[in-house]
Amino acid sequence: MDRASFLAAPPPDFHYADSAALLDPAAAKWHHHPYHYHDVEQQQQRLQYNFHQQQQEVGSLGDDYMGCVLNGFHGDGVDGGLGEVVEMSRTPSSSIQLKPDPGFFANGWPDFAPVGNHVYGISRTSSCPPTAAESSSPPAAASVVDGSKKRKLDKPQQRNPKVVAVDENGESKTKKVKAGCGDGGDKKSSVSSSSSSSKNKNKNKNVKKENSGADSSSKENNSSKVTHEVQKTDYIHVRARRGQATDSHSLAERVRREKISERMKYLQDLVPGCNKITGKAGMLDEIINYVQSLQRQVEFLSMKLAAVNPGMDFNIDSLFPKEVAAGGGNNFPASSDMAAAYLHLNSLQQQLLGCSGLEMGMMMNPSSAAADMGLRRTISAPITTPETETFIDSSCFPQQASIWDADLPSLYQVAFDQARAASFPSQQFAGSAGSSNLKMEMEM
Amino acid sequence: MRPPTNSTTFKREFLKKWLLALQLCNNHHNNNNNNNGVVERKNTIKLSAEIAMAAARNGATCWSRALIAKHSSSSSSLHNQTPPPRHSKKRVLRCKRIIRRSRRCIHHGPAAHGPAAAVMRRKTAVLRKLVPGGELMGDEASLIRETLDYVTSLRAQVDVMRRLARASDRAAMCNAMK
């Protein structure tokens, strides 16, 4: 919004009203709202709240009226946001045209299903004079007139455009608005069913005697009803700023671009070193590099794995039973291999899960396996000393566990069973052992 | 379809499947009784890791399905590498390019012109080649989404593989010291 003109041009009272309405907390919240898909009901509530606020603001100043023009644009096949423009206009004579500020309300509120109100920008227009469908003179205390109308836009591509103007003005301006109301009603009947328009009118007349808050809520109901009607036909809401093209192709393109940029943002978080880069091309570059580097890493690691296990394929499952079958003396390298693998996996889990001992299947056997452990410790290399404890992750490796069960000599079998039995009592101990192992892992 | 939010479960799943795949591969090689070179072993490991990664994604994503389809189609000819279809493939590629060019001439609006757009197209094409099944994805939005998912999965894969490599490295060192 060229806010300078917005602030400078209108008469002081309106200026005050608008800026007050913009500065109220709800509006501020809108302003700072990120691009989120929200719970619809929340939005509804917040919107109602905001309308309430605005109406109170304007109602206190009595002399202004506010036109809310809600445009629902129709696109094809893409689910996007609902875009409406709230137009606040004072009088046709003094109205000024303003463009919605991209930074102001631009961060949208898509998918606003039940109410169908998406306050997108606040502008005052003279090109679209507020031909209100309904205007009612409130009691003198409130001096708020509420009217809602629909108006067909003459854009050929939009099938169900809908404009709801909410006018709030003093007694003096009602007639002018009423003149527009019949017009708007007719146009609206051309858009949707005429019954709904008459319903609208009736509602508003009933509402006439009520106060401004009730006015606003009933207006919400009206517009929600109308938008529900429209939304039954598959209905895509796309925001269009003033001056943007509104034919269906442009709208679809805009939706597509928004989707892409949103996902790019996610990727930006994911790919390291992508934060500083602005611009899609640079980001794509970075993403490509990252994917390539990851794929190369996979290649390298598989090469390394292949090189490390020279005899046969790297396969700890088959390697392990084979070595067991080869003889009792050969047990220890195999077991340390397994244990190392398990250690890594366990520490991996631990890193990710924190110190929740439940997930970690690693534990020390406090009882009779301790001697066994000590024996193994003396035999195996000093680096792998903590790993010579039996590590079991039965939740993670059911087949592994069965392999252990089946193929291990009876000594290991006993250790395994005991470990499984003692898994829960020794949780804390296991946690501490795990952390020490983790540290070792880190420094390596 | 969301990117794998819980990377722990994904890693676990991947590891489980990978070890299973490795076991199967090893059995296969044992049966064949041929002494493989390092490169072949590496290929086997890589293949199994890729398939396991794709399988761990449960077919929820385009890239995983494409990866599995690619490997399953080539797994029948895992040992006898078949060069013959290459020629026809090349011809198909050329045809596709021509078609695309003509389509571009017809369809694209004013937004798709200019050097910046050309750069973007080129880079998108590169990305398409990198992500498995990227050629099949129609629009850019889904490509980016799949890339997001693929990158996450790749990271998990690399992490698991690195840990396993380190473990086996250590085991080998153990052996050497003993």
Image (cartoon, coloured by chain):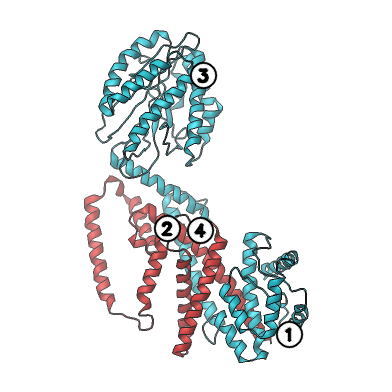
Chain colours: A cyan, B red
Q: Nearer the viewer, mark 3 or mark 4?
A: 4
Q: Which residue is mark 4?
A: B4
Please tell me which of labels 3 and 1 falls first in the chain.
3
Rounded to the nearest whole Å, what is the CA distance between mark 3 and mark 1? 83 Å
Q: Chain of mark 2?
A: B
Check contact, mark 3 vs mark 4: CB within 8 A: no
Which residue carries the number 2 mark?
A: B146
Q: Residues within 10 Å of mark 2 (few under 14, many from 20)?
A: many
> Label 1 marks which chain's residue?
A
Residue B89 appears in the picture as rendered: yes
Disc 3/disc 4 C-alpha distance (Å): 47 Å
- Specify the quadrant that holds the C terminus of chain A: bottom right
Q: CA distance from mark 1 to mark 4?
A: 42 Å
- The part of the image, by quadrant, that contains residue A282 is bottom left
Which residue, given by chain and number where applicable, does mark 1 sit on?
A379
Three-letter amino acid code at disc 1? Ile
Q: Horizontal placement of A150 versus A272: left or right?
A: left
- The residue carrying pointer 1 sits among few (fewer than 14), some (14 to 19) or many (20 or more) residues within 10 Å by Cα, namely some
**Above/below status of B83 relative to B150:** below
Of the numbered discs 2 and 4, the one sitting upstream in the chain is: 4
- The percent coordinates of residue A315 (x first, y second) are 54, 80
| Disc 3: which residue | A57
Q: Alpha-carbon distance for marks 1 and 2? A: 49 Å
Query: Which residue lies at the image location 52% right of the left edge and 80% below the top edge?
Result: A306
- Residues at marks 3 and 1 on the same chain: yes
